[in-house]
Amino acid sequence: MGRRITAQGHYSFGIGLDDTARTITQSNTMAIMGGNVSIGKTSSQYKLDVNGPVNASEFHVGDILFQKDGEKLWQMYEEVDGLYVKSMKTGKVYKFVLQEVQNASEQEGQ
């Protein structure tokens, strides 16, 4: 479907959104290649653009960039020694100080 994409894996499906030739070889795979994906809207400015709540059992990310109305405000990142937040306006960096709790189930919901 789309342009220049071939699905060879069993039960696989692909959508090509540009002129680059690609082949999906892995089975049980759905791939959208060469463009952006929007869910719940008709256009996308990002690789994945969702209008509405997102539910996931896991979410794997690198650095996290917080922005509002298109303005980049904060960057959260991790180093071996901890978690950090950087103000994109001032350049100041803040470190999260974490404290271990003895009984995590007692702390939930507080």
Image (cartoon, grey):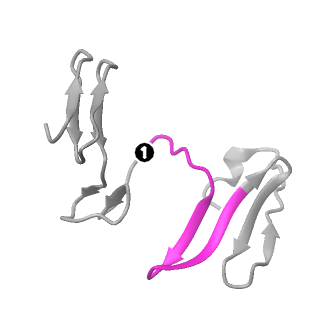
Q: Secondary structure at mark 1?
A: loop
Is residue 52 or residue 31 the one in the foreground? 31
Mark 1, Cα crowd under 10 Å, few <14 / some 14-19 / many 20+, is few
Residue closest to the eye, 17 or 37? 17
Is 7 situated above or below 56?
A: above
Residue at image position (72%, 71%) is: 86
Among all residues in the image, which is located at the extreme top? 10
Q: Is residue 16 left or right of residue 100?
A: left
Query: Is residue 13 positioned above or below 16 on the image?
Result: above
Give the residue number, with chain letter if any, for mark 1: 56
Q: Residue at x 24, y 18 (%)?
A: 8
Q: Quadrant of residue 31?
A: top left
| Residue 106: percent from left, percent from top | 70, 50
Q: Residue 97 location in percent, x, y?
A: 84, 61
Q: Which residues are magenta?
A: 57-77
Q: Position of residue 6 (x, y in %)?
A: 21, 27
